[in-house]
Image (cartoon, grey):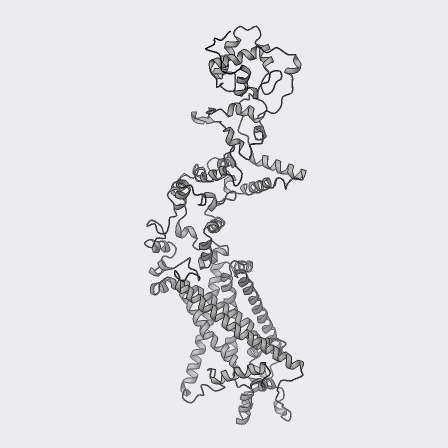
């Protein structure tokens, strides 16, 4: 058949065959995916209808994998060229088949609109965009590397047997075997992601159809269009993640679209705004109702909202969260999850008009003060949080001042004792020679009630320190271990409050005791004498004299019943328990507190409670321990006077000479003398003292570890 000039194609037949993709499957003299031109010519040799048959076959797609996209003139020219091929011997026809390259596959699948009938009569799209696929991370691989069940083209309809998991695993094993893991580092990341995916909710059988998983790789990634990190295509794919998730989670997508995150992503194309995987994670995703998921989602909020997450962790809600428990309020409990809006939006759950109702979703009896609690307050912004700023600066000055003075005091004391001993200067002693009736005697300083009160006070304080600092330094490993050992934050909170009630009861009881005892003689009692615990000018004089001794400028001063540091130890709890106890009661009875005070009082109370507790703990386990157990003239520790109630008479006379002299002069000394404690009592007191010292120093170490982690 001869074409007229009007019918003649614009390109030579061979160029047409190349341009239309035919050369991808066929060659002139050798079989590729399909038969060679020579084989086709041999098959139709002598058939006068060959040209008509082949043109119809290509035009209608019958007997050929795809309809040819060409005009009638072009089809005729190409068919004539093929039929004109000279037959070859059997060698060419029997050429070994090779794996088809991507151009062969894209000869059909790269044709726009290419599809086959799918379920329920809907067409199943099989079109692959050549350019987009070429730029993907898989663009350099052969199609049949993934579609392993396709061995020849044209191919029959095949089941969907592509496995991302086995393919990547096989490639990684091959890289490990070849020692090229560094060159394929990203592949190792993908394999690790696969391992996490296999444990996720997406990899589990679907509840409605157990024959399939909830979601596979290509439900999220678009099999042919996976792009490298940092590429523009990857950024565009990220913006479509909500829609990809919405294919299964349509209700959540509907809510997300109206949220501040959805508006930023879907309407404004803001790549920094949160998409589903930013909150729920990617390959580790699990049911949001699980405690572990709640913790992860809340932590993920902090990936974008770093400052807000940091301040949240300083609240009790955040401390419990940091310890690994999910029962306290999380970000989404207050702000919403898929429906989160800006706080200024009247529809936001955190808008001032709606805030109290939001608080009442957990705190049913919440009063108006709850609405003005500032969960993201900090100590740096005076304009927004002046009360927090002022409280913080005051507590820092107090802590710095107390430690600067008393640590200096301890250091100088140790230095003077060490230097005196090195120079052979003995501490002044009272000789009991010539008074055999006094030898071996002890002076009773504390009765049984005071000793028991001190023991319970010490135990309660250590329990408060352990349970309180575990929350204060919740980010430390030791805090999580302690809380877990105690049975969780709720049990730890009960223990903390019980210990608090005990220590406050002891504190109030001794005030009542002194009031009753001193009331009858309040006019005659020497309130500022050496037997009184009330500080006086003499304490200031003694302190100055002590520093003069530290520097070798004067002899060591003499003291009566109470030294100035003992008076400080006594009165410090009045301040400390007022702050710690008062703030603790406010936080315990929060509904009552919020009905009287504005919500920011919770911020101030939380800050003061923790900082004052830190001051008390570090002071007690450094300064108090030094003054009573670790100064050179007390070594080896512990001093057991608070357990036995007595002290050797020689030691009493040395440390409290003024009282000793006064008692001797008045003839009252022997009334206070007792026999030395039994050996069993002494041993038991030493063991108890060592245990308490060890526990206290351990608490000090834990607190310092927590403090160092926050600096």
- Please state the horizontal and vertical placement of residue 235, each as a whole percent of the image: 48, 40
Instruction: Please name the residue shown 55% across and 16% down the image.
Output: 14
Q: Using residue 197 as the reference point, say whether residue 315 is left or right of it.
A: left
Q: Position of residue 357 (x, y in %)?
A: 34, 54
Disc tally is 0
In front of the other: 232 or 453: 232
Give residue 181's quadrant in the image.
top right
- Image vertical order of residue 303 relative to residue 425, above or below: above
Front in this rendered view, residue 207 or 625:
625
In the foreground, 25 or 16: 16
Q: Position of residue 610 (x, y in %)?
A: 47, 65
On screen, residue 501 above or below 219: below
Q: Residue at point 36% right, 57% down?
A: 364
Residue at point 39%, 48% (across, down) = 340
Residue 435 in view here: yes
Q: Position of residue 4 (x, y in %)?
A: 47, 8
Q: Is residue 682 above or below residue 303?
A: below
Quarter assignment of residue 99: top right
Task: Work out whether residue 327 can be spotted.
Answer: no
């Amino acid at each position: 058949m001869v074409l007229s000039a009007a019918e003649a194609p614009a390109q030579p037949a061979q160029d047409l065959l190349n341009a239309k993709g035919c050369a991808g499957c066929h060659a002139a003299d050798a079989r590729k995916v399909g038969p060679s031109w020579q084989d086709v010519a041999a098959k139709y040799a002598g058939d006068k209808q060959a040209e008509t048959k082949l043109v119809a076959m290509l035009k209608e797609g019958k007997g050929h994998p795809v309809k040819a996209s060409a005009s009638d003139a072009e089809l005729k020219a190409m068919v004539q060229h093929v039929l004109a091929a000279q037959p070859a011997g059997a060698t060419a026809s029997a050429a070994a088949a090779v794996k088809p390259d991507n151009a062969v596959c894209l000869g059909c699948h790269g044709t726009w609109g290419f599809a086959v009938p799918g379920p329920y009569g809907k067409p199943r799209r099989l079109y692959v965009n050549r350019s987009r696929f070429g730029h993907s991370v898989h663009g350099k691989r052969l199609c049949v590397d993934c579609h392993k069940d396709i061995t020849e083209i044209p191919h029959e309809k095949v089941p969907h047997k592509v496995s991302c998991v086995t393919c990547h695993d096989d490639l990684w094993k091959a890289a490990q075997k070849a020692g090229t893991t560094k060159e394929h580092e990203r592949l190792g990341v993908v394999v690790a992601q696969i391992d996490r995916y296999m444990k996720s909710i997406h990899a589990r059988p679907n509840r409605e159809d157990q024959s399939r998983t909830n979601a596979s790789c290509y439900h999220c990634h678009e099999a042919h269009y996976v792009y490298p990190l940092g590429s523009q295509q990857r950024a565009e794919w990220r913006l479509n993640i909500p829609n990809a998730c919405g294919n299964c989670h349509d209700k959540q997508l509907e809510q997300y679209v109206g949220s501040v995150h959805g508006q930023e992503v879907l309407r404004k194309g803001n790549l920094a705004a949160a998409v589903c995987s930013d909150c729920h994670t990617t390959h580790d995703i699990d049911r949001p109702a699980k405690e572990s998921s709640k913790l992860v989602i809340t932590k993920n909020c902090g990936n974008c909202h770093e400052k807000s997450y940091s301040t949240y962790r300083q609240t009790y809600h955040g401390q419990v969260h940091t310890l690994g428990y999910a029962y306290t309020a999380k970000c989404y409990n207050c702000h919403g999850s898929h429906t989160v809006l800006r706080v200024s939006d009247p529809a936001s759950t955190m808008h001032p008009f709606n805030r109290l109702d939001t608080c009442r979703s957990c705190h049913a009896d919440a009063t108006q003060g709850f609405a003005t609690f500032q969960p993201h307050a900090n100590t740096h912004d005076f304009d927004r949080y002046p009360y927090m700023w002022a409280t913080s600066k005051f507590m820092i000055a107090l802590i710095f001042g107390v430690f600067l003075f008393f640590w200096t005091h301890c250091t100088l004391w140790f230095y003077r004792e060490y230097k005196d001993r090195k120079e052979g200067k003995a501490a002044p002693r009272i000789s009991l020679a010539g008074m055999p009736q006094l030898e071996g005697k002890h002076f009773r300083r504390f009765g049984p009630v005071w000793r028991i009160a001190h023991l319970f006070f010490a135990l309660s304080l250590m329990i408060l320190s352990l349970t309180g600092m575990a929350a204060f330094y919740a980010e430390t490993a030791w805090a999580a271990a302690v809380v877990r050992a105690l049975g969780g934050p709720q049990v730890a909170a009960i223990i903390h409050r019980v210990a608090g009630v005990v220590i406050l009861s002891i504190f109030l009881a001794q005030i009542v005791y002194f009031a009753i005892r001193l009331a009858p003689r309040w006019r005659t009692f020497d309130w500022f004498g050496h037997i009184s615990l009330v500080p006086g000018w003499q304490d200031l004089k003694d302190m100055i004299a002590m520093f003069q001794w530290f520097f070798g400028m004067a002899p060591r001063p003499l003291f009566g019943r109470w030294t100035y540091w003992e008076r400080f130890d006594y009165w410090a709890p009045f301040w400390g328990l007022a702050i710690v106890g008062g703030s603790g009661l406010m936080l315990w009875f929060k509904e009552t507190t919020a009905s009287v005070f504005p919500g920011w009082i919770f911020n101030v109370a939380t800050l003061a409670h923790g900082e004052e507790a830190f001051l008390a703990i570090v002071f007690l386990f450094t300064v108090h321990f030094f003054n009573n157990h670790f100064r050179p003239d007390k070594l080896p520790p512990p001093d057991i006077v608070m357990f036995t109630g007595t002290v050797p008479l020689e030691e009493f006379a040395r440390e409290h000479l003024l009282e000793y002299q006064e008692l001797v002069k008045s003839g009252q000394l022997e009334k206070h003398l007792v026999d030395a404690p039994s050996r069993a009592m002494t041993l038991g007191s030493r063991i108890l003292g060592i245990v308490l010292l060890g526990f206290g120093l351990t608490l000090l170490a834990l607190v310092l570890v927590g403090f160092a982690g926050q600096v």
